[in-house]
Amino acid sequence: MLLRGRRSPDQTEVRRDLALVLRRAVVGGSFAAASGALAFAVGGWAWALAGILAIPAAFTLASIRRPFVAPCPGCGSLLGAALVQLPDEPVLGPLVRDLRCAACGIYVDASSGVVREVPFRRTLESPGFECGLAADELGRLAWGDTCVRCGHPATRALRLSAREAGVLSGTEATLDAPVDGAGPGYCAEHGAGDDPIARGLMVARTPGRVTVQMSLYAAYRAFLDANRDRLDVAVRSGALHDPPPVGD
């Protein structure tokens, strides 16, 4: 059950999906065959395209060794069922950390064959909890009133760079905005300097797209819940449940 502002209480079990082995073998083999045909039958300029096709072929075929799936404990969507695997996509298994559910956006861990949402206190060494959105939604995001680096009450906020492309939370961003939810908040101890990694926040813009990455999972989850109707997630804000009262 996907709760607003609280870790999802449910846990699900990891299981082997033998049918997934066959499907990935077919897809990976198709990529490999296409790559080989371009490289040897066409040659020349086609070698570059053959090399590109060889990447999903190799990683998809390698993922056959881990044909594991599990329902997301937050929204119930099936995790690990993707047919094509790429280098930056973790494969579900009995032991895996920080796997993102593409449907609802939460991150999960699998330990001893059980999947649960990651602890809110988890902090990555560099921003990695990620979500994306259309660039024209950037000015309408709700950032909340807590420090995105540690979760304590914010005393100041970051004014993001106005550049059309590049990192918006780096050298051109300034800590002179009011704490009104319109910009990422910081406490008195965090946010100084111009390093997005030290700030625990990476906001990057490309033509038409914005990617937001955070180091603190609690900050990411709060941001995710507050902006579901603007972000690239299938589970919208109307599907969230308020946590039960304490003591119930």
Image: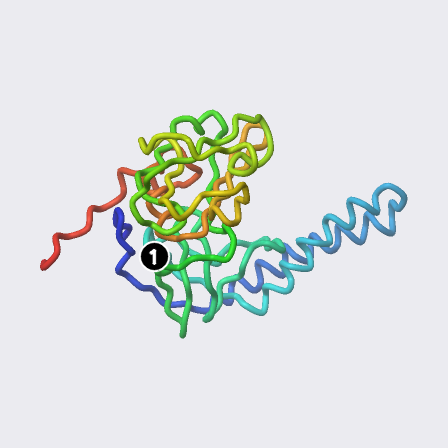
**Which quadrant of the figure contains the C terminus?**
bottom left
- Residue 21 found in image quarter: bottom right
Relative to 143, say whether 82 is above or below: below
Which x, y percent locates residue 43? 88, 46
- Residue 234 found in image quarter: top left
Which x, y percent locates residue 25? 63, 61
- Residue 46 found in image quarter: top right
Local packing at callout 1 (Cα closer than 10 Å; few below 14, some 14-19, many 20+) is: some
Q: Residue at x 75, y 50 (%)?
A: 34
* Chosen colour scheme: rainbow
Instruction: Check the image and name the residue furthest to the left.
Output: 247
Mark 1 lies on a secondary structure that is: loop
Which x, y percent locates residue 175? 44, 35
Q: Residue at x 38, y 27 (%)?
A: 140
**Observer-nearest residue: 89 or 158?**
158
Which x, y percent locates residue 26? 63, 57
**Observer-nearest residue: 88 or 176?**
176
**Observer-nearest residue: 221 or 151?**
151
Amino acid type shown at disc 1: Phe
Q: Residue at x 32, y 38 (%)?
A: 144
Instruction: Check the image and name the residue furthest to the bottom.
Output: 112
Q: Is residue 104 visible?
A: no
Residue with the mark numbered 1: 120
Relative to 184, say whether 107 is above or below: below
